[in-house]
Image (cartoon, grey):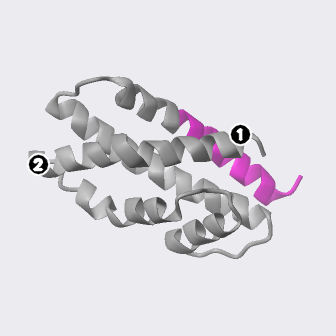
């Protein structure tokens, strides 16, 4: 087993733990403003682990990817992930997520996480668990 193969599996374990935490937030019906901030922060580090796990997996498969965008594009091309446009949108909206002190922005971020981003992260976790 190569170092790259071990690396992506170790990162996958951390990613799965983060997804479990994100799931707890998403499964709650209503969040208070502090919980919304926690949801957003949890999404941020889960998303970070998602693309880095993809990158490690792709490198173990012989791909040379350098950036988050290139990682997502390559993962989409080899059908590791679906909905590449949603992944890119999530990548681009990370800056929006930093403004959680603004309740309107936080509500928009919560809607995106619950409505689109959680599903792609969960799908990646399930896909990687089969590899």
Task: Report helix, strand or loop for mark 2.
Answer: helix
Residue positioned 38% across, 50% down in the render: 44
> Residue sitting at 23 percent across and 36 percent down?
36
Instruction: Point out the stretch of residues depicted in magenta.
Output: 1-17
The secondary structure that dominates the magenta segment is helix
Q: Nearer the viewer, residue 65 or 131?
A: 131
Whole-number angstrom distance, CA of label 2 to CA of label 1: 36 Å
Q: Residue at x 62, y 54 (%)?
A: 53
User: Residue 74 falls in which quadrant of the image?
Assistant: bottom right
For disc 2, the neighbor class at 10 Å (few under 14, some 14 to 19, many from 20) is few
Q: List x then y, in percent, for residue 66.
A: 59, 75
Task: Relative to 122, say whether 52 is above or below.
Answer: below
Query: Residue at 52% of width from left, 59% of height from top?
Result: 83
For this view, does 35 lie left or right of residue 25?
A: left
Q: Secondary structure at mark 1?
A: helix
User: x, y (%) of residue 98?
Assistant: 24, 56
Where in the figure is residue 11, as x and y percent of width and height? 63, 47
Query: In the image, which disc is placed on residue 55?
Result: none
> Residue 7 at what x, y percent from top left?
72, 53
Q: Quadrant of residue 99?
A: bottom left
Residue designated by label 2 = 104
Label 1: which residue? Answer: 129
Q: Number of marks in the image?
A: 2
Q: Is residue 37 magenta?
A: no
């Amino acid at each position: 087993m190569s170092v790259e193969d071990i690396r992506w599996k170790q990162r996958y374990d951390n990613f799965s733990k983060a997804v479990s935490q994100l799931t707890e937030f998403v499964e709650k019906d209503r969040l208070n403003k502090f919980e919304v901030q926690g949801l957003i922060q949890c999404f941020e580090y889960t998303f970070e682990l998602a693309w880095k796990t993809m990158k490690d997996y792709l490198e173990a498969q012989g791909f040379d990817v350098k950036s988050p965008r290139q990682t997502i594009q390559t993962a989409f091309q080899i059908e590791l992930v679906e909905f590449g446009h949603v992944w890119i949108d999530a990548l681009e909206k990370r800056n929006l997520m930093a403004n959680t002190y603004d309740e309107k922005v936080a509500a928009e971020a919560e809607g995106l996480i619950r409505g689109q981003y959680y599903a792609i992260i969960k799908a990646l976790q399930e896909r990687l668990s089969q590899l």
